[in-house]
Amino acid sequence: MSARASSTAIGVFVSGAILLAVVAVLIFGSGKLFSKQEKFIIYFDDSVNGLTVGSPVKFKGVQIGQVSNIMIHYDQSDDSASIPVIVDIDVSRLRNELGDNTDLSDPVVFAAQVSGGLRAKLQLQSLLTGLLYIDLDYYDDLANTPPPPPTQIKLKKYQEIPSLPSGLSEMMKSVTTALENISEIDFKSISVKVNNLLDQLNNGVSQIQFKEINDQLVAATTNLNAILGDPKLKEAIAQLNTTLGSFQQLSDNVNAQVQPLSSQIQLTAQRARATMDQVDKTLLAVREMVQPESSLRYELDSALSEIAGASQSIRVLADYLERNPGALLTGRPPPEPLTVPGKEAAPATQTTTPPPTAPATAPVNAAATEPAAAATR
């Protein structure tokens, strides 16, 4: 007769089978058994608040890995405040499922990708939860530019992906400030004021006499229809049209007469302008003639000097004739001889001398001296 199986052994066997099944599901279900995970390190200068272990790592929105560790300081200088984050990227998934043949596990290929503009940046998963994820992307403005110096200084255990500032800290500060400002608003007081305003509006509306206003509007409409239907109004409108036509005709006549008059005014203005130009030229010529250095001024001065000399000669002749009226007939008497005491006077000889002339300082005109010479003869 066979021995009876132990219930304890059966229980252990069943428990072991269940445990193996669970482990198989976890291993094969996660896919890590056939995946190639590569670790990378990223140093962020921004705050990583909202980034947790297991947060997704995405490339242009497609998840390719997750955060495996977040540290405060790792293989960096003492004065560096950057936060190191270790990420696991499924390189095999990039190649097999996503169609990207880039092997980031190869240091040469990875360096070429960084030189081509590959950078990491923190992005917001949800504004409500504040959770973050890491986004990898290529930036054209950073392509073919020298990558920043690595933050790792000694170990250099992981390949380092350079990061870019995301500006989430400033955005979160702005959101926090806006929420604080909103929380300071006294909504209760505003609600009370709005309720009071609505009560006042209700009271005001209840006092409006809508029936009286309606009756007045109907009466005003009736009166307006009566006025518009009045034949006198139509006649006044017709007369107004006639008046407007006459006014238009008068305006056309005025325009027809003003245009020739305007032409005459323009012609007169042109002639006046030409006359003024001629007057300006004449005044300029006169100004040049009366200048001290002009030839006309010199000739006028010479003529005036000669006239002054002739006038002086005539004045002297007139004075002489006034004193000797007979000189016109007898001529000028001879001068008395000079007598010396003790001697007889010499016999006087009749001589004829010319009348006194003008002083030598004034020029004598020949036409003025001729009458005087004739009078002496």
Image: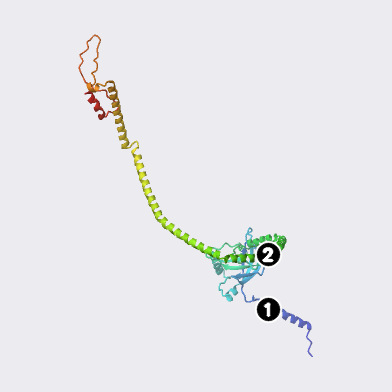
Quarter containing the N terminus = bottom right
- SS for dot 2: helix
At horizontal 41% and vertical 56% (from top left) the residue drawn is 259
Name the residue furthest bottom.
1
Q: Position of residue 147 (x, y in %)?
A: 55, 63
Q: Nearer the viewer, residue 139 or 199?
A: 199
Q: Position of residue 124 (x, y in %)?
A: 63, 67
Q: Residues within 10 Å of mark 1 (few under 14, many from 20)?
A: few
At horizontal 40% and vertical 54% (from top left) the residue drawn is 261
At horizontal 68% and vertical 78% (from top left) the residue drawn is 25
Amino acid marked by disc 2: Glu
At horizontal 62% and vertical 67% (from top left) the residue drawn is 134
Can residue 359 be seen here? The reply is: no
Name the residue furthest front.
232
Q: Residues within 10 Å of mark 2 (few under 14, many from 20)?
A: few
- Which residue position holds label 1? 25
Q: Is residue 258 above or below residue 166?
A: above
Numbered tag placed on residue 212 in the rendering: 2
Q: Nearer the viewer, residue 229 or 251?
A: 229
Amino acid marked by disc 1: Val
Does label 2 or label 1 sit earlier along the sequence?
1
Can residue 231 be seen here? The reply is: yes
Q: Nearer the viewer, residue 204 or 152?
A: 204
Q: Quadrant of residue 215?
A: bottom right
- SS for dot 1: helix
Q: Position of residue 138 (x, y in %)?
A: 56, 67
Q: Give the number of callouts.
A: 2
Q: Position of residue 337 (x, y in %)?
A: 23, 15
Separation of disc 2 and disc 1 at Cα? 85 Å
Indicate which label's residue lies in the foreground, 2 or 1.
2
